[in-house]
Amino acid sequence: MATIKEIADIAGVSRGTVDRVLNNRGNVNPKTAEKIMEIVNALDYKPNKAGLVLAAQKKNLKLGVILFGEGNPFFDEVIEGIRQKEEELACYNCSVIVERVSIEVSRQLAAIDRLLEQDVNGIAISPTNDARLAARIDALFEMGIPVVALNTDIPGCKRIAFVGSNYYHSGETAAGLMRLMCKDPAINVGIITGSNDVLCHSERVAGFQHLLKQCENVQILETATNEDDDFISYDRTTQLLRAHPEVNALFFAAGGVYGGCRAVLSLGREKDMTIITFDRVATTKEMIQKGVISATICQQPHKQGSKPLDILFTYLTTGELPKNEMEYTAVDIRIKENIE
Amino acid sequence: MATIKEIADIAGVSRGTVDRVLNNRGNVNPKTAEKIMEIVNALDYKPNKAGLVLAAQKKNLKLGVILFGEGNPFFDEVIEGIRQKEEELACYNCSVIVERVSIEVSRQLAAIDRLLEQDVNGIAISPTNDARLAARIDALFEMGIPVVALNTDIPGCKRIAFVGSNYYHSGETAAGLMRLMCKDPAINVGIITGSNDVLCHSERVAGFQHLLKQCENVQILETATNEDDDFISYDRTTQLLRAHPEVNALFFAAGGVYGGCRAVLSLGREKDMTIITFDRVATTKEMIQKGVISATICQQPHKQGSKPLDILFTYLTTGELPKNEMEYTAVDIRIKENIE
DNA sequence: GATTGTTATGTGCCCGTGCACATTTTCATC
DNA sequence: GATGAAAATGTGCACGGGCACATAACAATC
């Protein structure tokens, strides 16, 4: 692996000149620059990462994280990923500040301000999809502060990457699993969705329905709108199952899973019901272990926490952008036996 | 984050003394050493990784990899992981040499010799479980050359880590999946195993059987020993299905999956058969997409390639051992919808 | 041709750690 | 108390890259 010094020796110039060419700092004779670039290409020069990181020490990097979903256990796992990466980055003299706020745009903008006051060099955020926030992210980019979106994308702005799941695709996978697990001649599915205005829920339902519509033995009976509150979920699920006793499969696209499962249990329907949910929160784990939930689809929350910090750190130390702007987490199927 | 210099300043000594204490190089006044250690603990000093890696440049690290499974497409994916990590490590001036040999112990020992001739500083190997190899690995460790086992463990020797799957556990998961996917009143399973003397196959079968024995509606009908050769597999599977037309589920614990699936197809049994296999080789992918195979369980071949190199590099640059000696890959369930 | 300005190039230090070597201190011995 | 060995401590450089500053080369102007 070639170094700047080696290139300089071959070209018969000093390290400084090579450095100026590589970082296009100007003030170099075009002919010399061309010659250097030829050598750089011939040797396939790649800067030594340890050198880059060490040189970047002076910047005293600080990364900011803004997460919504207070009280949402999914984000607790995201935080775990953040904490682990934080520890890893600590020995590069890079620290992490986490702000946890609601989904309200004004709160998110305020969180950005607070982080800027603390001189963060980059921000990872689970953003509300809002034009004001998008504009703010663009402004940050112009200021030289890169932003990575996580969990939920905010398209059409200058965030340097998105890390999260493809909700439509995981909805399709849920449907595929259900088809494999429900071998009854007629599958009568009840869909329990979250609030429609949250993109991830509606995307999941869309993917789910799209795939199941192709199967003639599947009938989607009813779609109940749910809420995270488990008591409300209990009632809605009970209503659905009372109105449609022929339902033998349930799809929970969002929260309220625990309440829904309790409803199934209290009606004594757990034996003949195939239930597919999302995420691996504690209560879902419990219901998987009890055999009430057949499978749950996870979206690697740990990676959603760690990867954005990784991307920011790499960008700030080496200037390198991620290979893929969209970093989709794998669709991770969990059943009783591999839930741990 | 504290540095050696900072600690030295506080202790009123020079960098060299702190360095001697931290790396117990001796020749330090015990009282001074104690004082320094107190400061080190109080500040929770962690060496800066970039500094460590940069200092390790002089070693000109070379990592060797020895893989069996020539012609086995699973290992092609392992190689992909290796290549990717190789590229990543290249910008730390660390290179990788791959040797691909058969499972024979003599070949593996010879491969180690070839790598040593090329002055490798560490070795990742998919080992045959043999005492001679274990002894050799111990000797390498004493020589200061760390070894990481991948795919198959070689217990009771001084390999610094193992990266691979828990076969028993993935067998259990296959069983759990089958139970969820076969809702017929009677599940009649045919198990198609690989050669019994290969540990991973027998472990998978053991885990599979252990779980299914707890279900009274499941009957394991017959276990056919299979081979990787798809023509032999075709014949064995045909025989099994002819002798037991009531079989409605097949479990392939090892190779010969493609031949077995062709047999199922030629008997027109694909509609009512639940097939669960391992790995995500091209032919398995094809059969998943055709709907012949219901699910396949993967063991993150990419990670099996990249992680051992990661462990070796970290150990050689920082002296740090992995948190867990056993690095199990996640049990990764793939169906038609998430096979890509 | 000396002066000023511009462009081009070279040099030194920093980042944090490891390690070889130089220097100082300590202590025993005559 | 001078001598020498041993123990304890200090110092300089390397690793690779970024960046500020010093120096050199060259052109334009009076």
Image: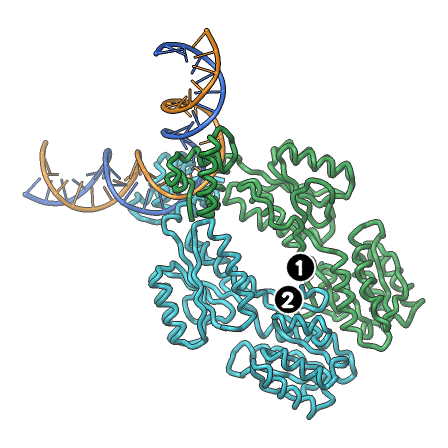
Chain colours: A cyan, B green, C orange, D blue
Residue A138 visible from this viewpoint: no
Callout 1 amino acid: Ala
Q: Is residue B128 above or below residue B333?
A: above
Whether discs 2 and 1 lie on one chain: the answer is no
One can see residue B179 in this view: yes
Where's residue A47, x and y in %? 45, 45
Q: Residue at x 68, y 66 (%)?
A: A339
Give the residue at mark 2: A332
Q: How far across and how far down the image is residue B270, in percent? A: 81, 71
- The label shown at residue B330 is 1
Q: Residue farthest to the right?
A: B243
Q: Badge 2: few (under 14), some or many (20 or more) residues near its Cα, within 10 Å?
A: many
Question: At 57% across and 42% down in the image, what residue appears?
Answer: B315
Q: Which quadrant would residue B125 be assigned to in this image? A: top right
Q: Quadrant of residue B143?
A: top right
A331 vs A274, nearest the viewer: A274
Tell whether label 1 touches label 2 (CB within 8 Å).
Answer: yes
Circle number at residue B126: none
- Residue A34 vs residue A22, the one in the foreground: A22
